[in-house]
């Protein structure tokens, strides 16, 4: 394939007034670096990139030569001047629309260069012929054939047709079902505006069924805004939504690891997060499972392995060790739950021994969590998912003999507040279900470092509200039992409210 050269045999500069400004000509040249720098600024092209790849400059110039009104509507009269052979089809295209695609522009210029005609002169004839008011004077254009080979399996004939249709019409609707293929087609065509619209469609269409493919597409095409949106969506929905559906099986380990390490991860409790992760491993090893199993089924599966070593020390489990290192097992305080974990022989024995030893130490010292050094990465987490139908929503939690109610209140359609307060075990409506087999602390005060955070999605963007870290003594009297309230104004729903705390050394 011949290489198109735009260099003139000798240097020249076109002087414009006293500024010595290089004016955009019909015949570009790159021999004069000062002139080239001025030209790059004029057409908004990176100077260093042009030095590495002069084709960028040629394509940018051609695209800028066509008025915007020609780029965004089909030619009302006249035959198509280019035939694109691709995916076993022949697509007829007009030059003004074709030049919106960087790839097609380059193929077209290469096709011009292969002929005997001077490509610069051919373009000079073409440009004025496409301008408004000159349609009647347009001569019949000999159709030029260009070929494009596509190896991306995401690009189907239907998706590519939609991508080409967008060269002619503004805002052609791209459905969520087709968006992956259209995105891939836009990437191959170097059709940036369509690519960005596909990204927006994907960001607004995240569900348990689409999250995997959309995330992998973001990684494949190095689209950071899309991968970030997928990660953020998963931080909120891993436990309450994805973890309840069979789509959990498809979540890539890389994405799961990023989400587990995030300080913004939402979970109802540390136990809920552990159950979700155990379920993910179960689904990786049971490909034929078509429904979400009961938690008891998952426990039975792992307990069926030989007891000579724990699951994570086996060859099959070692690859998943980094995921479980992200868990905060010290946030699981009920003896029954810890006994179940010991029985299934999933974790190294040293992990559970350390967790239980820390629990005993905390109980002996009035609840002080000496083993927790940092609230952001080690704080015990609980969460409320505040849905539209709620006016109030609360949950009682028990840690080391202290009882707290975490609560959300809706005041009107856009006003909410979230707080936590210490309560007496005798004040519980269903006391036995909460503190059964649980210790009860009689300490009058408990020093707590905590943070309350609320997050919600509004118009495709996440809003985040936080109290920041607060250290406070919680008593049992009305004046000292309640935390600072996180008051927010938002139209977003649902609201993911997270309560993270540490019992500080007193």
Image (cartoon, helix red, strand yellow):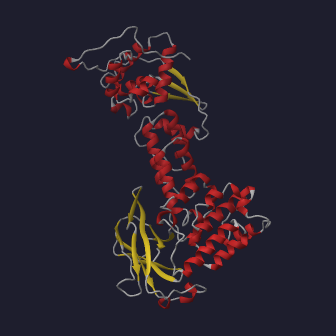
Q: Position of residue 344 (x, y in %)?
A: 72, 70
- Please identify the quarter of the rendering in which residue 314 is found: bottom right
The quadrant in which residue 217 appears is top right
Given residues 321 and 464, the one toward you in this image is: 321
Q: Residue at x 48, y 33 (%)?
A: 190
Towards the viewer: 168 or 210: 210
Furthest toward the bottom, the residue is 426
Front-most of 290 and 373? 373
What quarter of the picture does the N terminus occupy? top right
Is 462 situated above or below 333? Answer: above
Report the number of discs.
Answer: 0
Indicate the position of residue 453 as horizontal and vertical percent values.
42, 67
Residue at the image position 37 percent from the left and 17 percent from the top:
28
Most extreme residue toward the left is: 18
Residue 445 vs 206, above or below: the answer is below
Please say whether residue 388 is visible from this viewpoint: no
Q: Residue at x 33, y 29 (%)?
A: 67
Q: Position of residue 490 (x, y in %)?
A: 35, 65
Say whether residue 294 is left or right of residue 117.
right
State whether residue 146 is above or below residue 463: above
């Amino acid at each position: 394939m011949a290489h198109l050269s735009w260099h003139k045999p000798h240097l020249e500069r076109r002087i414009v007034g006293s500024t010595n400004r290089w004016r955009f000509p019909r015949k570009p040249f790159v021999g004069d670096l000062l002139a080239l720098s001025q030209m790059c600024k004029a057409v908004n092209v990176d100077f260093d990139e042009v030095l590495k790849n002069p084709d960028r400059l040629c394509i940018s110039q051609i695209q800028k030569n066509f008025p915007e009104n020609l780029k965004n509507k089909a030619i009302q009269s006249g035959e198509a001047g280019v035939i694109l052979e691709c995916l076993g089809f022949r697509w007829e295209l007009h030059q003004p629309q074709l030049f919106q695609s960087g790839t097609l522009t380059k193929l077209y210029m290469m096709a011009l260069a292969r002929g005997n005609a001077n490509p610069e002169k051919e373009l000079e004839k073409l440009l004025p012929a496409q301008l408004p008011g000159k349609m009647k004077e347009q001569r019949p254009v000999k159709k030029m054939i260009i070929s494009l080979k596509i190896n991306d399996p995401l690009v189907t004939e239907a998706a590519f047709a939609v991508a080409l249709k967008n060269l002619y019409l503004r805002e052609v609707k791209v459905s969520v079902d087709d968006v992956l293929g259209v995105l891939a087609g836009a990437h191959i065509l170097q059709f940036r505006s369509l690519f960005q619209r596909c990204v927006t469609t994907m960001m607004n269409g995240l569900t348990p069924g689409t999250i995997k493919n959309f995330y992998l597409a973001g990684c494949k095409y190095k689209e950071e805004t899309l991968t970030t949106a997928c990660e953020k969506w998963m931080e909120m929905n891993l436990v309450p939504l994805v973890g309840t559906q069979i789509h959990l099986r498809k979540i890539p380990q890389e994405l799961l690891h990023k989400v587990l390490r995030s300080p913004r991860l939402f979970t109802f409790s540390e136990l809920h997060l552990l159950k979700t992760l155990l379920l993910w491993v179960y689904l990786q090893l049971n490909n034929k499972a078509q429904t979400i199993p009961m938690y008891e089924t998952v426990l039975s599966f792992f307990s069926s392995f030989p007891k000579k070593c724990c699951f994570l020390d086996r060859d099959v489990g070692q690859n998943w060790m980094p995921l479980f290192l992200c868990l905060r097992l010290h946030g699981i305080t009920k003896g029954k739950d810890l006994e179940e974990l010991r029985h299934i022989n999933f974790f190294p024995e040293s992990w559970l021994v350390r967790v239980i030893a820390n629990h005993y130490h905390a109980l002996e010292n009035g609840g002080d969590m000496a083993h927790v050094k940092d609230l952001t990465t080690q704080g015990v987490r609980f969460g409320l998912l505040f849905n539209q139908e709620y006016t109030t929503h609360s949950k009682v939690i028990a840690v080391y003999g202290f009882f707290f109610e975490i609560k959300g209140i809706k005041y009107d359609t856009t006003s909410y507040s979230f707080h936590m307060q210490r309560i007496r075990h005798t004040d519980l409506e269903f006391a036995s279900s909460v503190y059964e087999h649980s210790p009860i602390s009689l300490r009058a005060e408990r020093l707590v470092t905590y943070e309350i955070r609320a997050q919600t999605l509004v118009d495709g963007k996440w809003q985040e509200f936080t109290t920041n870290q607060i250290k406070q003594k919680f008593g049992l009297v009305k004046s000292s039992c309640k935390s600072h309230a996180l008051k927010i104004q938002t139209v977003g729903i649902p609201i993911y409210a997270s309560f993270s705390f540490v019992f500080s050394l007193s």
